[in-house]
Image (cartoon, rainbow, N blue to C red):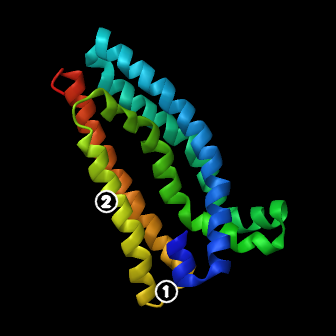
Amino acid sequence: LPIIAGLYGVTAAGEFSMAQRVVSIPLALVGGSVADVFHSRIANLQRSEPRKIAGSFVNMALMLFLVGVIPTFILGFFGGQLFSIILGSEWQIAGVLVSVMCPWMLAQFIVSPISRLVLLSHQQYNKLIFDGLALSLVFFVPNWAHQARMPLEQTLQWLSLALMSAYFIYFGILYRLALQLSRGEA
C-alpha cells in the first residue's frame, strides 16, 4: 500500500486498499481455518501413516483450487460491475483491480494453507526464501512498472503474474517436501 501510494497517489492507494481488503478478508478466514485443519491432519499422518502425506497434500491443494476457481472466475470477469452494484459506482476501479489480482489471490488461497507443511519439517528456511522472494517482487515490480509509465491496472497485472509465479514455485517446493515427509526423509 505505501508503495502504491508513493508511486500512483492516494486515490489509487485507496482503490487498491479497498480491492485488497475485500478479497483478503474471506481469504484469511477460509484459508486460516483450512490451514488449521490441514496442519492437524498432516501432523497426525506424520505420526501414524507418513506415506499418505503427499496424497493428502495434493488432495487439499486440489480441493482449494476447486473451491477458489469459481469465485476467482466471477471476480475476474465481473469485478468492476460487482463492486459498482454492491459498493457503488465510485468503487468500480477497485473492482477492476480485484479482477487483475485474481490469479495472485487464487494462488495465495491454494498455497498459503498448505504451506503449514514447513512447520512439520526441519526446512522452515523454505518459507523464509519464499517470503524474501515475494517481498522483493512487491517492491521491484511496481517500481519497474512505474518507471515504464504503466498505469496502476497494468502494474497490478504484472505484480499478480509475478506473485502467482512465486506461489507456483513455492508449491513445487512444498510438494517436494511432502514427498520427503512421506518417505520419512524430512
- Residue 171 falls left or right of residue 64: left
- Residue 176 falls left or right of residue 62: left
Say which label, 1 or 2, has the lower sequence index: 2
- Amino acid carrying label 1: it is Met
List the residue tagged with mark 2: 133
86 versus 56 height, above or below: below
10 versus 123 height, above or below: below
Nearer to me, 166 or 55: 166
Q: Position of residue 111 (x, y in %)?
A: 42, 43
Residue for point 54% across, 63% down: 101
- Amino acid carrying label 2: it is Leu
Residue for point 45% across, 31% down: 60
Residue for point 40% across, 71% down: 139
Q: Position of residue 53 (x, y in %)?
A: 31, 23
| Secondary structure under the numbered disc 2 in the rendered image | helix
Task: Tell which tag, 1 or 2, sits nearer the viewer.
Answer: 2
156 versus 45 height, above or below: below
List the residue tagged with mark 1: 150
Q: Is there any visible trace of residue 166 in the rendered image?
A: yes
Nearer to me, 158 or 65: 158
Q: Position of residue 76 (x, y in %)?
A: 61, 61
